[in-house]
Image: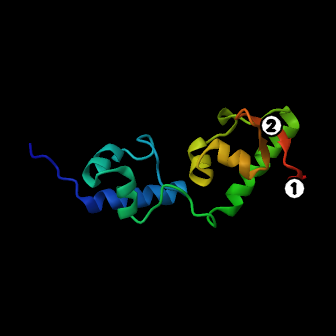
Amino acid sequence: MARKIITNDFFIEEVKKTAELLGRPPVGRSEYQYRYLASQRFGSWQRFLEEAGLHGQAEPSEGIEIRNRYIAEVHKIVDVLNRVPRSSDFDDMREVKYYFKSLSGLLEAAGLEKMSNGYWSKKFKEEEI
């Protein structure tokens, strides 16, 4: 039985289709079954995404509505649960990381205050109030 050769163009077409469905580039193998192979073929996952014309992080002007929804969710968690949000509070941390780079990036964007000990306060910065 002959082995099927997967071309670079195939990898790129597939990742673009997946990114369109997700609204962002896939990050894990569960989202893109060829992640390991594409990373090997292109030298790294980041290089592969660049070759496909995709970015691992959102541009600052990208997804304003999505960013605002996450920021509102942070405010709601603080108001209702009276605590700082945790990663388990969000349905898709991969999306949070795509738009904010990390949970800390989201908390900062939402106006929470980071204390000197590195923990986040459930109080918002003065200018956010």
Q: Quadrant of residue 67?
A: bottom right
Residue furthest to the left in view is 1
Which quadrant of the figure has residue 58? bottom right
| Kind of residue at badge 2 | Ser
Query: In the picture, which quadrant includes the N terminus?
Result: top left
Is disc 2 placed on a helix, strand or loop?
A: strand
Local SS, label 1: helix
Q: Residue at x 72, y 32 (%)?
A: 117
Q: Crowding near pointer 2: few (<14 within 10 Å), some, many (20+)? A: some
Give whichever of 24, 14 is nearer the camera: 24
Give the x, y percent position of residue 115.
77, 37
Give amino acid for label 1.
Glu
- Residue 68, position in %: x, y? 74, 56
Q: Dots 2 and 1: beta carbons under 8 Å?
A: no
Look at 45% across and 45% down and name the residue there: 31
Residue 51 place in picture, x, y as percent? 35, 63
The number of numbered badges drawn on the structure is 2
Q: Residue at x 41, y 66 (%)?
A: 53
Q: Is residue 72 left or right of residue 129?
A: left
Q: Position of 113 compared to 25: left or right?
A: right
Left or right of 125? Residue 35 is left
Residues under labels 2 and 1: Cα distance? 15 Å
Circle on res. 121: 2
Residue 80 - label: none
Left or right: 21 with respect to 32?
right
> Quarter of the image holding residue 59?
bottom right
Q: Nearer the viewer, residue 60 or 62?
A: 60
Q: Which residue is mark 1?
A: 127
* Position above or below: 102 against 82: below
Q: Name above or below for residue 28 compared with residue 15.
A: above
